[in-house]
Amino acid sequence: MSFQQPLFLLALLVVPLVIVLYLVMQRRRAKYAVKFTNMDVLASIVSTRRSWRRYVAPVIFLLALSALCVALARPQQSKLVASQEATVILVVDVSGSMHATDVKPTRLGAAQKAVRIFLDHAPKNLRVGLIAFSGDANIAAPPTTDHNLVRQADATIGDFTGNGGTAIGDALALAVQVAQAAVGPTGGSSGQTIAYHPVAYHPKGSQSPVSIVFLSDGHQTRGALQPLEGAAQAKAARIPVFTVALGTPNGTLTFGNNGFGGGQFGSPNGGFGGTIPVPPDPATLRAIANLTGGKFTDAQNAKTLNDAYTNLGSRLGRKPGKTEITNEWVLLAAALLLGAGLLSAFWSPRLP
């Protein structure tokens, strides 16, 4: 904890002065002779049991006084605060394998819920964009501070399945392009994309205000760029990529007559129903995170996925800063004063 006006902490010297004054008054009282000589009657009026109670209210009062003195110094607490220029690009795999049910209700359903969880925990002024990809990548929602628009786009990302396959490298490259278009030294809070100024905005060695959260459940099967080629573009732009491998190693997809259409994968039995394995590729996604300075999560169930997006939503778009907590100290002092008053009234000796 730090203070905006540390000199006001000198007001705490009032506390020991009050204690000294109290002790002096107690000594002066002890010098007076007892004028009421009938001690039996006096004892029946003022009980000597639990004499410690008479000190509780004064101690609480001194604590309240101390809290007020601290409040005068305008205390600050170090914490993560929302960054005005931050942007996060959410990238979600919507290929056919995302209809596998090893993560409930389906991988795609779990991913859509995770996006909503991220938005629930993200700062309100954070620009969030959404990209859906399979064999090609599409912008479902450009970076915007209107999180309701992103929620609406999230509800329809299953429509971007396209021609099937998984183009991880191309999706990363598109996310970098969208991120670069969304930041700049003149960026406002309207949520609209603006021109990118790499020289003015990114001094050498600095970290971009943009992050990419990349979720996929499969291996690269299509695309012009390989995954690490796309990651290299993110690294060059100093954009960390937080990757999530969704699904279990034994995940399978039902296709054909009674399940998901087999045209995207090729039916081994002439189009009749069957299953194919659809394991995720954690090794590639881990390499992407390591290369770009992000973090990798292996999400084999919905809880792990939700926890990861909760953590990312609470952390991304924020930077180390300080918030003033003067009001909290004033409220503490008020509560202590109230407590001291109530205890004093309840425990003070009274004549019958």
Image: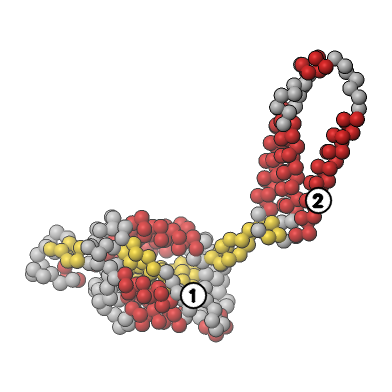
State left or right for residue 226 relative to residue 294. left
Question: What quarter of the picture does the C terminus occupy?
Answer: top right
State left or right for residue 292 relative to residue 82. left
Instruction: Write the residue at 63% across / 58% down.
Output: 77
Circle nearer the viewer, 2 or 1: 2
Above/below status of 53 relative to 279: above
Q: For mark 2, give the secondary structure.
A: helix
Q: Amino acid at mark 1?
A: Ala
Residue 333 in the image, given as x and y percentages of width and height: 70, 44
Give whichever of 342, 220 is nearer the camera.
342
Instruction: Write the residue at 74% across / 34% down.
Output: 55
State left or right for residue 181 relative to residue 44. left
Residue topped by disc 2: 13
Circle 2 packing at 10 Å, graded few (<14), some (14-19), many (20+), is few
State left or right for residue 221 relative to residue 273. right
Give whichever of 155, 307 is nearer the camera.
307
Question: What quarter of the picture does the N terminus occupy?
Answer: bottom right
Residue topped by disc 1: 182
